[in-house]
Every structure is written in structure tokens, then in C-alpha cells.
Amino acid sequence: MVSLHDRLVKAIADTRGDFAWVVEDPETGDRSTNQPHMPFPGASTLKLAIFVRLLELAEIGAIRLDAKLKLRDWHRCGGAGVLQYMARGTELRIDDLATLMIVLSDNTATNVLLDITGCAPATATIGDGHSAIRRYYGKPTMPLPDGRPFTAIATAEGLASIYRRALTGSLLTERTRNQFWRTLERQQDRALMPRFLHDSVRVAHKTGAIDGVRHDAGVFWVPTVTSAEHDPMALRGTDRPNGKPIIFVVLSRELEDRSWSVENAGEVGIGRLARAAFDWFSDRHCPQ
């Protein structure tokens, strides 16, 4: 049987760029890594850490997720999301802002939430010594501690560690873990990890993109029984996934394809990596 690593390397042989990844079955230890500790521009993947910090604060009673926060002009920025277009003074619940941050990667919603979490405490939920949220999103005038011009820095291992702890039950309580998975399953960007997977495959993930950079970090579940056909109009994340969870974190940079379309070579490459990983784990653990 071809090794998982060889299968993954082959999947992106024609994609021009620099890739890092952690792909693993946390139950058996089967895994492949490539540059797992190398810092990459984090883009929006670090919004995952902000989300975890919000849930931690809710658990200790420091905040209520149903409390409302007010949109101020300073929070606004361009890029992903819809909150930037809403009226000054719009009030939204914290959990609704978190949903916008995760499922639409809303930068303005992220900035509202950073007022609560702070950059450093959110970064501490990863704790790998490299990953960092360094300033608010879309605020290039905010000073940075060094010459690297990136709002966020991430490593594949740092992001994988969040999912590993969530799957083993050491991250958050059961109630807030359920909210964690439910929100991540509702991710709207399906051009990367889910791209070549069947619609019935459950995926919980957070994407990220800036010029020359594409990322996807999350978990997919290899079904152990025949899955029912997915209803595209059904709400996602309303029940617990069945099957074998596989951690899938892929970061890319220096992509030759700088286009902003769903056919971007980095997005297609990550889709191919996910399909290669899915097939390898399916063959190994769910032989026909």
C-alpha cells in the first residue's frame, strides 16, 4: 500500500507553491506531516483561536454568548464578510458575531470580538510558540512587533493541536465543544477541503486566504457506514458526525497562481490533498 505521505506528495506534484501540513488519525497515530512547525502567514485560520477563547470566556462566566455588542466605525474593514456594510450601531449577539467570523470569515465581526478576547489571550489557546494574532484584521496602520507584514502567523501543528484536543475532550466542556463543532461545520467556503469530497462527508473547518496564500484547517469524518444522500438545503451541524475523524490542516504560500477564483491552483491543490487523504484512510480503515 502506498504510504499516506507519498499519496499526498503526488496529489500536489503539479501545484507550484510551498506547502505545510498535518494529516492524522488521532486514534491510531497514522499521520503525515510536512513542515509542521514552519510559520506561515496565518490569514483567517487564526480566527479559530479567537473562537476558542470566546468559548473559554463563556465557560468561566466572564461573558455571555447571548450578550450584544455594538458595531463601531473603527471595527470596519474590507475583505471577507458582510458586517462591514451594516449600519453604525448595529447590535449583534456574541455568538452570532462568532458565526459570522467562522462561516463567512467576516473580518469586521472578528474585530468586534477581538475587543473581548484580545490578541495575546486568543493566541495562547494555541501555545506552539510560533502562531500569533498580531493585530486587528484589515488595520495596516497598527504597528507590528517585527518586519513581517502579516496580521496573523500560523503553523500546521499549532492549528492541528486545537482539533486534536477537541477530539480527545481536553479542549472546552462538552456543551461548548458541541458549539465549536456545530459552527465549524457551517463553514460556507467549500472550495478547498470539501472540494472533491462527496456532499455526505462531514467536514468542520476554517479557511484562510490572502494573495499567494491558501489554507484549510479542520476535520473530516470518514464514514464507517453508508451515508444517506446529503440534502443541500438541510441545516449543517445539527447532529453529531458519525465515522472516523481525520485531522486535516494544510497551509500554502508563495503560490504561483495569484488569482482570486475558485479555480485558484492552491485551492484545487488543497482539495486534491483532502481527497487523497480521504481515500487513503478509507482504504485502510473501511475496506470494501
Image (cartoon, rainbow, N blue to C red):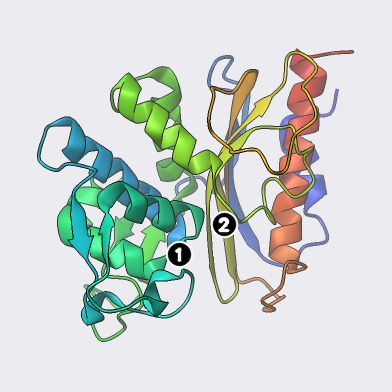
What numbered label is drawn on residue 43? 1
Q: What residue type is labelled 1?
A: Ala
* Secondary element type, mark 1: helix
Residue at 44% over, 52% down: 102
Residue 132 seen in the figure: yes
**What amino acid is found at the position of numbered circle 2 in the picture?**
His
Quarter of the image containing the C terminus? top right
Q: Quadrant of residue 59?
A: top left
Q: Distance between the residues labelled 1 and 2?
A: 8 Å
Image coords of residue 116 (percent x, y):
16, 55
Query: Which residue is most to the bottom?
Result: 141
Q: Mark 2 points at which residue?
A: 215
Query: Up-down: is 200 above or below 78?
Result: above
Q: Identify whether 170 is placed above or below 183.
A: above
Identify the residue at horizontal 38%, vertical 54% (top origin): 47
Q: Which residue is drawn at 62% across and 18% down?
A: 242
Q: Which of 260 and 238 is in front in this view?
A: 238
Q: Position of residue 146 (x, y in %)?
A: 26, 75
Horizontal and vertical percent position of residue 104: 50, 59
Label number found at residue 175: none
Instruction: Determine the secondary structure under disc 2.
Output: strand
